[in-house]
Image (spheres, rainbow, N blue to C red):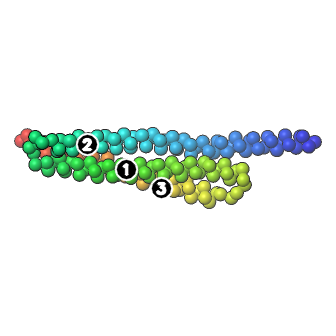
Amino acid sequence: MNGLGSLSSYTVQSVDIAHLIQIALTPIFLITAIGVTLNVLTSRLARIVDRARAMEDVLRQPGHTQDGRDLHGVLSVLARRARYINAAITLITLSALFIALVVVMLFVNAFLRWDLAAFIACMFILSMLALAAALTAFLIEVRIATNTLQIGIEAAARHEE
């Protein structure tokens, strides 16, 4: 009978662990999505930095005859865009870390039988807030890039007239 009791408790624990893994998979998929978004953000930042370095090289050339105001203006816009992308990268990384804490705390809560429900909920809420803030910073950066592009097109159209 004693062996049967431990088999029964083993089965319940296995079912509990399987259920816990199912619950933990949803936040893990969110981490995957955040990783893809982080890849996009870092690629945008790399392109901004490369473009800024190329413009700085043009400004440093001894034969550069322009007064450089146009390039300095573009560099200023690129610096603004880089700050927003950097903020988005920081926030989305924090979001992923909070989600990772949620997964860890789900397992700690299950195995140690601590009441971490409020902590887990707070970490998830913080993760969503950080994700929303990161996406907002990304949206602002895209808007800056788009508005700068439109201004460039309008200026070229006026120059052709």
Label 1: which residue?
A: 86
Q: At label 1, which amino acid type do we have?
A: Asn
Mark before the other along the chain sequence, 1 or 2 = 2
Q: CA distance from mark 3 to mark 1?
A: 17 Å
Residue with the most extreme left position? 161
- Closest to the camera, between mark 1 and mark 2, is 2
Mark before the other along the chain sequence, 3 or 2 = 2
Q: Say what secondary structure mark 1 lies in.
A: helix
Category of crowding for the residue at label 2, using alpha-carbon neighbours closer than 10 angstroms: few (below 14), some (14–19), many (at least 20) = few
Q: Residue at x 41, y 48 (%)?
A: 89
Q: Say what secondary structure mark 2 lies in.
A: helix
Q: Is residue 48 above or below residue 113?
A: above
Q: Nearer the viewer, residue 1 or 80?
A: 80
Left or right: residue 12 compared with residue 58: right
Say which quarter of the image contains residue 44: top left
Category of crowding for the residue at label 1, using alpha-carbon neighbours closer than 10 angstroms: few (below 14), some (14–19), many (at least 20) = some
Q: At label 2, which amino acid type do we have?
A: Arg
Tell me if I can see residue 153 in this picture. Answer: no
Label 3: which residue?
A: 129
Mark 3–mark 2 CB contact (< 8 Å)? no
Q: Residue at x 84, y 40 (%)?
A: 7
